[in-house]
Image: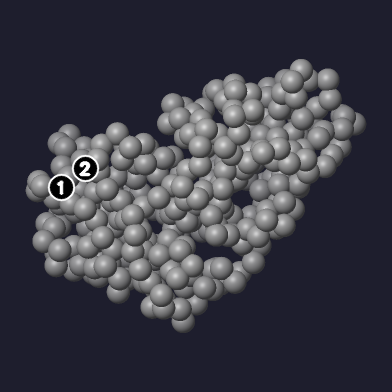
Amino acid sequence: MFNYLGQTNLKTGEIMSVARIDGPSSEWRPRLLSFLEHKGPSWRRQIEMALTSPLDDLGAHFYLGLLPGHADATPVCHIMVSDYHGVALLGHVYTHPDQRQKGAIKALMDLVMKDCRVRGVDVIALGTGFDSPPFHIYKSFGFEPIIPGDGSMIHEIDSALLTQLGAMPTALGGHAASANQGISTRTLRWHDWPAVCLLSILPLAPGEIDPRSVLMDLKPRGLAEGAFIDFQLLRADNATVDGAVLVTNNDIAVGWATVAAVDVDGSDRWVVDAYVAPNFVDHYGDLIAALRLPDAPVVAYVNGDGPRADALRRAGIRCLALYKSTP
């Protein structure tokens, strides 16, 4: 669906039109795939899927800057926002090389942020290079590093969501009051992408034992943006691979678990990863129990003891130390 959002002025004096294409969109799919053809194979596959048919209940929104005179309304810059129940992930920020140095992305960002507010987005996460030019653009729109010196950034449009989640450190507005209310588990779905990415960049909690995920290379933490896509594509090709999430009563993921064959130190093992936000650690057992384990030996990598290791052992999963965990 094509949604016209307005016009904005570039540094050159050119007037750029801005539109939001909501996936799926058969009309815009060829043009968007062509414009974003520089993306890697997994990214291109996920973009094509989002433009072809719904990815569960994930909102896939392609924001475009368009200049008059371009044949067939070819976009000159692009930002993608993926969201579910108020949690959003911002990415695929790109300007065509011939249109750079005009302030196109900053102009586009202004309308993107306004539209996110209108659509009810509460929290947006993204990843970029720390102290890079994009970093400072995002900072000018209210994004802040989630930890000092880090390129993982977060913007709270409405702090009520973080309060309800009860999963964030108090420095980010989190509260523990609702941590045990209305918690359940279900299978991991495409629309969990923004929430899992938000969880993946949370600061290490006091006493947290790394790694957060071997499969997603979160050692100890990091943005799971691309790794989540790779995992979902792997699940589509291999029925033995499984994922589950721990969700609040409004279906926001506050923890995730995966089981897949992972190459660790040159040998493939079936590995269970599990991470639950700090205020929900009492539910590790529920989350791990929601996984469909293979009929094969399964291990988990946990560099110490704590609620996660205890829950894994109770589930009969052998815990090993990952000595190559990075700081």
Q: State whether residue 22 appears in this view.
A: yes
Name the residue: 58% across, 60% down: 86
Asked if residue 244 is positioned above or below residue 129 in the image, the reply reads below
Drawn side of residue 112 relative to residue 193, left or right: right
| Circle 2 crowding by C-alpha within 10 Å: few under 14, some 14–19, many from 20 | some
**Which part of the image, by quadrant, shows the N terminus?**
top right
Q: Which mark is residue 294?
A: 1
Whether the residues at callouts 2 and 1 have beta carbons within 8 Å, the answer is: yes
Q: Amino acid at mark 1?
A: Pro
- Residue 14 occupies which quadrant of the picture? top right
Rendering coords of residue 214 (x, y %)? 28, 47
Kind of element beneath mark 1: loop
In this orientation, which residue lies closer to the viewer: 297 or 138? 297
Rendering coords of residue 219 (x, y %)? 33, 50
Q: State whether residue 80 appears in this view.
A: no
State the separation of the CA atoms marked 2 and 1: 6 Å
Drawn side of residue 221 relative to residue 150, left or right: left
Rendering coords of residue 131 (x, y %)? 60, 45
Residue, far bottom: 177
Drawn side of residue 244 relative to residue 201, left or right: left
Residue, far right: 13
In this orientation, which residue lies closer to the viewer: 275 or 46? 46
Name the residue: 82% across, 42% down: 6
Q: Earlier in the sequence, mark 2 or mark 1?
A: 2
The residue under label 2 is: 240
Name the residue: 90% across, 31% down: 13
Drawn side of residue 252 relative to residue 296, left or right: right
Asked if residue 169 is positioned above or below residue 11 in the image, the reply reads below
